[in-house]
Image (cartoon, rainbow, N blue to C red):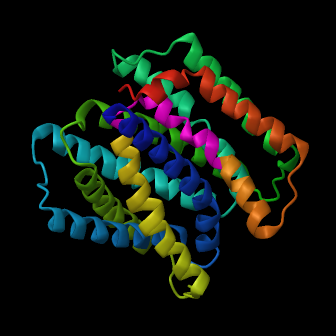
Amino acid sequence: MNGNRERFKIWFGFFIVSTVWGSTWLAIKIGVERIPPFLAAAVRFVIASAILYAIIRFRGLVITRTPDAKKLYLAMGILSFSIPFALVYWAEQYIPSGLASILFAAFPFWVAIFSHVMLRNEPVDGFKLAGIVMGFAGILIIFWGDFTLDNSLAAIGMGAMVFSTVLQAYCLILIKRLGHAISPYVMNFVGMAMGAGCLMALSLATERWEGITWDAAALLSILYLALIGSVVTFVTYYCLLKRIQAVYLSLTSLINPIVAVLLGALVLDETLGASVSAGAGLVLVGIVVANGRNLVRGRA
């Protein structure tokens, strides 16, 4: 019975992360059209960290201060919630949200490399590599006809997106190594609070605030990204990391673009072509090939 409950938690958490983060690309795009990117990311994490702190106090959790915990907090603050999100928010000013999600789908490749080098019990085998390649190929099939760039900074934006995946992949493996004894609420609170401070400082130094549009769309974008896109999903994400291998968890980034496409069809009445079905099918097959059996069994 406990095994079934654990499998349900893993699959449900995987579904939550994949679904919610598939919608955040659009929410970020809406936000940066009205608010400077670094400020938008900073406000998102200010709200999210405040919510997480309230949860920590309510639940009586302890903020661990061991040397490993401090290393982890610093890594999360810089390599997960500061530089990568600054790159992502900046890049989404110049590239379509769909293209951003494709570029972020390179995330499992970097996770596989870092996990093979840094985690002895999570080496990359042929199944994982084949599954990642198949999944990424599926994403390319879905979006291949939509590759349009009409901005001179688009290439730099694409590079920024890819570099953000490298940093976040490395940080994910550090969390896998050092974060077993730390509550996901605590590690996310400290990391997001540090990220909020760094992003706010970056905004003050580089952005002008007089042209900000604080309309309903901007506020809803920030609140959704803070509460659902940050608090709910990041806590769920790092709870999953304690239960399954890092490479399997990283495969959620292959599902995110599919969710984005489906939301476009449901919300914006966009047409789903045959390439979407074919690409989505290949992504799902890739996830199974990457060894979905261990995901179902909940191995760490």
Residue at 88 percent of width and 45 percent of height: 145
**Residue 277 position in % (x across, y down):** 82, 41
**Vertical position of residue 134 compared to residue 4: above or below:** above
**Residue 45 position in % (x across, y down):** 38, 66
Asked whether residue 153 appears in the rendered view, the answer is: no
242 drawn magenta: yes
Could you say which quadrant of the image residue 30 lies in?
A: bottom right
- Given residues 108 and 59, the one toward you in this image is 59
Provide the residue span drawn in magenta.
241-256
- Given residues 262 and 46, the one toward you in this image is 262
Residue at 72 percent of width and 50 percent of height: 99
* Total residue callouts: 0
160 vs 279, left or right, is: left
**Residue 128 position in % (x across, y down):** 56, 19
**Vertical position of residue 79 compared to residue 125: above or below:** below
**Vertical position of residue 163 compared to residue 108: above or below:** below
- Given residues 142 and 153, the one toward you in this image is 142
Please identify the dominant SS of the magenta region: helix
Work out which quarter of the rendered image holds the C terminus and state it: top left
Could you say which quadrant of the image residue 24 lies in?
A: bottom right
Residue lying farthest to the top in this orientation: 126
270 drawn magenta: no
Residue at 76 percent of width and 64 percent of height: 266
**Residue 212 position in % (x across, y down):** 56, 85
94 vs 273, left or right, is: left
Asked whether residue 173 appears in the rendered view, the answer is: yes
Work out which quarter of the rendered image holds the N terminus and state it: top left
Residue at 51 percent of width and 22 percent of height: 293
210 vs 155, left or right, is: left
